[in-house]
Amino acid sequence: KQEVTQIPAALSVPEGENLVLNCSFTDSAIYNLQWFRQDPGKGLTSLLLIQSSQREQTSGRLNASLDKSSGRSTLYIAASQPGDSATYLCAVGYGNKLVFGAGTILRVKS
Amino acid sequence: DTAVSQTPKYLVTQMGNDKSIKCEQNLGHDTMYWYKQDSKKFLKIMFSYNNKELIINETVPNRFSPKSPDKAHLNLHINSLELGDSAVYFCASSQQGRGPLRETQYFGPGTRLLVL
């Protein structure tokens, strides 16, 4: 069964801290992995997309890594800001569909 | 210039009613999706269409019927609504073709459905 797990479920940090969100998946036969951000009452915004042949992707203060063999991905957020507060979702691409984790709720305190 | 839009944003209805949710994308994408996000916040794929053709149908009760009049629209009709249908329904689109996923997906704002 293809399952995606995100740890921690919730995280609260002071502004300025660097932080890491974790995602693990049970089936390593993936095509890609995406990280999304979801703000309360809103849709999802794609942050980073890593193809299965890639090891990492970077966008601004965000860096996502992928280790297919161990079934893990991490999202690193540098110098966190209150505006980063949201739910972060990891989604793994299997065939022609995405399987989502339950998300990590991040709160950055000013 | 909304990329993926859904209507209505909120929907409150009684059990047994029939309702529809509409989705439109102006990104020129070929593939559209419907997802359900339940109370535990898990997002699960329900359907996907590529150029008006059904590609994915994930063990969804046949009370749910998607309809794609053209590749820019994917509507979701739900018959005989049940309490368990209460959830947030998200529409998404991508440039993705019929093959394995390579492209990112763009999501609408969601429709919050409450069945009483």
Image (cartoon, coloured by chain):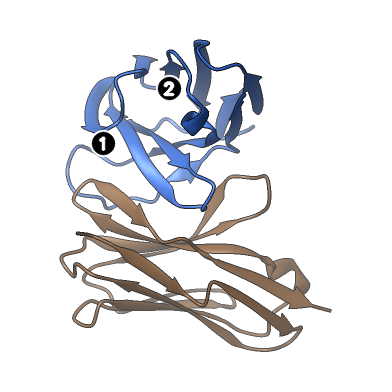
Chain colours: A brown, B blue
With A86 as the anchor, is A9 left or right in this view?
left
The quadrant in which the C terminus of chain A is found is: bottom right
- Image quadrant assignment for residue A88: bottom right
Q: Residue at x 42, y 13 (%)?
A: B79
Residue wearing tag 1: B58
Question: What element does badge 2 sit on?
Answer: loop
**Residue nearest the viewer, comparing A9 with A51:** A9
**Residue nearest the viewer, comparing B70 with A19:** A19
Q: Amino acid at mark 2?
A: Ala
Residue wearing tag 2: B72
Q: Amino acid at mark 1?
A: Glu
Question: What element does badge 1 sit on?
Answer: loop
Query: Can residue B83 be seen in this snapshot?
Result: yes
The subunit letter for the residue under badge 2 reads: B
Q: How many marks?
A: 2
What is the residue that sits farthest to the bottom in this orientation? A17
Spot occupied by residue A21 in the image (x, y as percentages of width and height): 50, 78
Spot occupied by residue A49 in the image (x, y as percentages of width and height): 39, 63
The CA distance from mark 2 to mark 1 is 21 Å
